[in-house]
Amino acid sequence: MGARATIIFHALFLTSLQLLLTRHVSSAAGGKWNLLLPNVGIAAMHMQLLRNDRVVMFDRTNFGPSNISLPNGNCRDSPNDIVTKLDCTAHSIEYDVASNTVRPLTVQSNTWCSSGSVRPDGVLVQTGGDRDGELKARTFSPCNNNRCDWVEFSNGLATRRWYASNHILPDGKQIVVGGQGKFNYEFYPKTTSQNVVALPFLAETNDRGEENNLYPYVFLNTDGNLFIFANNRAILLDYVKNTVVKTFPAIPGGDPRSYPRTGSAVLLPLKNLEAVKIEAELRKMPRARVMGDMTLLPNGDVLIINGGGSGSAAWELGREPVLVPDLYQPENPVNSRFESLNPTTIPRMYHSTAILLRDGRVLVGGSNPHAFYNFTGVLFPTELSLEAFSPVYLEPEFANLRPKIMSPKSPSRIKYRTSLKLQFKVTGEVKSPVKVTMVFPSFTTHSFSMNQRLLVLDNVKFTRKGKSMTYEVQVRTPRSANIAPPGYYMIFVVNQNIPSEGVWVRLQ
Ligand SMILES: *[C@@H]1O[C@H](CO)[C@@H](O)[C@H](O)[C@H]1NC(C)=O
Ligand SMILES: *[C@@H]1O[C@H](CO)[C@@H](O)[C@H](O)[C@H]1NC(C)=O
C-alpha cells in the first residue's frame, strides 16, 4: 500500500446527500452519547487536553458574566466588556476527566478566537485574541493540586493575532500563522527582534477583501515543511527560508473552506514513512456539514462531528444542526469509508468543539452563535453542557478484544529512532499485526484541531508471553521531529480495530 500524508476537506456536498443517507440507514448506527455535565459555566469555544487528563477550556472575556464564579470571590475590571465593567465570573475552566468536575480559572485579557499549542514540556501556550488580548501570550502548566492557573505575558506576540493558527515545530517552538488582516507568520517564543515574516499567500487568499482565509489549516509535513491551506488553496512552505516549495491546485469548484465558510481539515494517519507524498483526495461526505470538527480516533478512523447543514460560521448564520456524527474509515475500500453514527440531541453550532480523550471517548462542548451569553429567545441557545461521544469500539461487546497496556506505564519517556516494547493483555483473541498508534493532543477551536497528528508505528516483532493472555509488541519510535514534534503523546495498542486506553509518553 502506498504511503501517504493525505488531507481531506469538508465541504458542502449537497448532491450526494440522499443517496448516501439511504444507504447508511440499514447498516447504521453506533456509538453512545452521554451528558457529562449539564452546565460547566462557560461555552467551551477552545479546548486542549493536557498530559494529566485535564482539559483546559475557555471562551472570551468581554461579553458579560458567565455562569461560573471566579475562584476565591475574585472579580476583574473589564473595561472592554460590552455588558459589565466588573466581572466576577470565569471565562476559562479546567475539566478533570477522572472526577468529571470543573474548576474556574482566571484569565484577565480577551482570549476570543485565539490559538495555541502544547510545548514539549507539557505546558499549554496560547496566543492572541481580541482587544486587550490581541498581543498576549498565556501559559498554563498542568498540575494535580488545583493550584495552577493562567500566566499572561504582554507583548508575547510581535503583532496582533485574531483567528490565527498555531503549530508546534520540530525545535519545540511554535509558529503562529495569519489571523485577521495579517498576511504573515511569527514564532513563539520570538526568534528575532522583528520576528514577523511576510506570507503573500495569505494576501492572495483574502479574496476581494472578504476574509475567507481565517484560521488557516496548518500541518507539519514529514519533510519539515508546513502544509498551509487557506480559502480554497494550499502551499507547502519552507518557513525557515520563507520560500513556497510547492503550490497545490485549487480545490475544484473554488468554494472556500476556511472560516467563515468553515469546513475542517485533518492529517490522516501517518504510516510507512519511508516515502511520504501529499495526495489530495476528494470524497463526498454523507451529508452537508459546515462548522464540523474532525477528530482522529486511536484506531486511525476520523470522527466528523458537530456543526450545521447550512449557513456559515459567525454570529447567527448557521442553520440545520447536524446531530449525526459521521465516521470516515480511511482503510476501507473507497465506497465504504463513511458510516453514520448515533445522533446527539444537543445542537453544536458555531463555537463548538470536540477532542479525543485518553480513554477513547470524544469530549464535545460549546456552541454559542451569539455575541453574548443568550439562553432564551434565540434559535440556538448558548450551550454550557459537556457531552462525551463513545465510539462503537467502547461497547461492552468488544471488552474481550480490548488491549490493556501493562507497560510502559503512564507517563513514560521515549526517544526518537529506537525500539519500544509494549506489553499488554487481551482476554479474547488477538490478531497479529496489532497496531500501535501515537496521538498528539490538539488545540481545538473553530472546527480546526491544531497539531492534531496520529502516527502508526512500524511493527517489528510480536510475541505471546506464555499462556497468561499477555503479549508484547515491539515497534520503532518516530525517526525524527519532522515526523513527530517533541512532546507528550497518547500511545495506544489497537487489536482488530479496538483500541486500548492510551498511555502518556513524552517523546524527546
Ligand atoms: C448560573 O445559573 C443559575 C441558573 O440560572 C443561577 O441560579 C446561578 O446563580 C448562576 N451562577 C452564576 C455564577 O452565574
Ligand atoms: C442576549 O444577551 C444580551 C446581553 O445580556 C441582551 O442584551 C440581548 O437582548 C440578548 N438577546 C436576546 C435575543 O435575548
Image (spheres, rainbow, N blue to C red):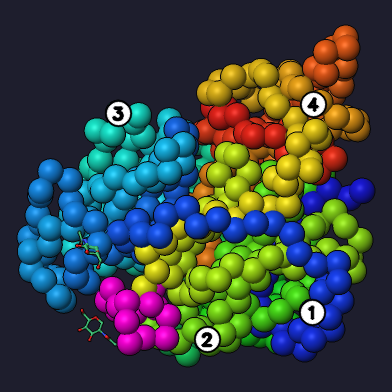
Tell me the crowding category of disc 3: few under 14, some 14 to 19, or many 20 or more residues within 10 angstroms, Cα based: few
Disc on the earlier residue, 2 or 1: 1
User: Which of the image's four quarters has the C terminus?
Assistant: top right
Q: Which residues are magenta?
A: 368-381
Q: Is mark 3 within 8 Å of ligand 1?
A: no
Which amino acid type corresponds to the residue marked 4 in the rendered image?
Val
Residue 70 locus on image (x, y percent): 18, 51
Residue 370 locus on image (x, y percent): 34, 79
| Residue at screen point 68% across, 53% down | 391
Q: Are marks 3 and 2 in contact (CB under 8 Å)?
A: no
Q: Is residue 506 found left or right of 286 in the rendered image?
A: left
| Residue of label 2 | 319
Give the CA separation, mark 2 to mark 1.
Answer: 19 Å
| Residue of label 4 | 426
Numbered disc 3: secondary structure: loop
Q: Which is nearer the eye, 135 or 474? A: 474
Which amino acid type corresponds to the residue marked 3 in the rendered image?
Asn
Residue 376 locus on image (x, y percent): 32, 82
| Residue at screen point 72% across, 87% down | 14
| Residue at screen point 42% across, 86% down | 379
Disc on the earlier residue, 1 or 3: 1
Q: Quadrant of residue 237?
A: bottom right
Numbered disc 1: secondary structure: helix
Give the CA separation, mark 4 to mark 1.
Answer: 36 Å
Q: Is residue 187 above or below residue 502?
A: below
| Residue of label 1 | 21
Which amino acid type corresponds to the residue marked 1 in the rendered image?
Leu
Q: Is mark 2 within 8 Å of ligand 2?
A: no
